[in-house]
Image (spheres, rainbow, N blue to C red):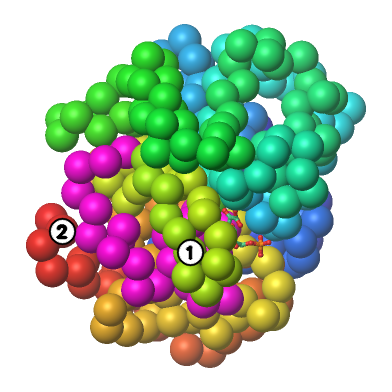
Amino acid sequence: MGDTGANLNLLPREVLPGVLVCPNAEELARAAARRFVDWAWQSIARDGQFHVALSGGSTPQALYRVLASQEFRGQIDWPRLHLFWGDERAVPPDDPESNYGNARRELLVRVPIPGANVHRMEAEDPNLGRAAHHYEELLRRYLSLDDRGFPVFHLVLLGMGPDGHTASLFPGSRLLRETSRWVSTPNVAKLGKRRMTLTLPVLDAARRVVFLVAGSEKAATLREVLLGHPEPPLPAQMVQPRNGERIFLVDEAAAALLGAAAPSAAAAQPPAKPKGRT
Ligand code: 6PG
């Protein structure tokens, strides 16, 4: 599928290696949906299944609606998909804050995915450490492991906060130096809330990581993440798939500060990895 059949005027344009700019948030969702369909078929053809970690926050919800639409839902072999989450808030699944709850409302109740293929993070569990352990066991049951023993997702969807956080990996968190655990339960000081999140080594083990970033409030951070070398690096910058692809699908508003300063493809080298991470 790719962008075949899409309105040529609305196609994403690549401004930096792996950075695709879409005219607006709606076209961002459609460009992401077209690629989701392709990646699903590729993974199912190769491995028989498609293992995806969904993102939380508001930006991916448009994608979930498009995937559930008449136009797209028939193009996906839902019984071969297994859906997981990159992070979750410590709230019940019916709470408006719940990442699972939002995906359920926008996608899961509208597509024929078997309930047994939906693996939410039970972050409402008062014993969050136990829930994180259970989630690690779940990943071990369904996902293959890479050469370092980390679970391999076919696709991880991520967002980015204006502070450069992604999933529930926030700037300054000790979690950014995690090298062994798969799932963690940070107490996010700036929010005063607990979260459950996949760790960097798991994000870096993915076959493909796709950041969905929209809105002018993200422009300065996106420029820093893609063109800057802040010390310490921002969490969204630290996601560097070892044997996989990293893609930023963004809208014009978020890319507003990339244009002029976007160096030639060759010069746009990813920022240095933080010390100790190879
Ligand atoms: C979460 C997310 C978080 C999100 C960013 C961007 O649970 O909140 O996983 O990392 O992706 O905060 O959120 P928006 O898409 O709402 O801007």
Q: Estimate how packed mark 2 is, as few (under 14), some (14 to 19) or many (20 or more) residues with alpha carbons within 10 Å.
A: few
Closer to the camera in the image, 278 or 99: 99
Is 22 on the left or on the right of 46, as rendered?
right
Residue shown at 41% from the left, 31% from the top: 130
Q: Residue furthest right?
A: 70
Residue shown at 82% from the left, 24% from the top: 109
Residue 142, visible in the rendered structure? yes
Q: Which residue is mark 2?
A: 277
In the rendered image, which quarter contains the C terminus? bottom left
Is 227 on the left or on the right of 266, as rendered?
right
In the rendered image, which quarter contains the N terminus? top right
Residue 160 in magenta stretch: yes
**Magenta region, residue range:** 159-182
Q: Quadrant of residue 243?
A: top left
Name the secondary structure under disc 1.
strand
Residue 243 in magenta stretch: no
C-alpha separation, residue under disc 1 versus residue under disc 2:
23 Å
Closer to the camera in the image, 66 or 115: 115
**Which amino acid, by three-letter code, is at mark 2?**
Arg
**At which x and y percent is residue 250?**
62, 64
Residue shown at 13% from the left, 69% from the top: 275
Closer to the camera in the image, 60 or 246: 60
> What label sits on residue 188 in the rendered view?
1
**Which amino acid, by three-letter code, is at mark 1?**
Val
Q: Is mark 1 within 8 Å of ligand 1?
A: no
**At which x and y percent is residue 136?**
36, 28
Rendered view: 251 above or below 263: above
Residue shown at 21% from the left, 66% from the top: 273
Rendered view: 274 above or below 147: below
**At which x and y percent is residue 179?**
19, 49
Name the secondary structure under disc 2.
loop
Is 258 on the left or on the right of 106, as rendered?
left
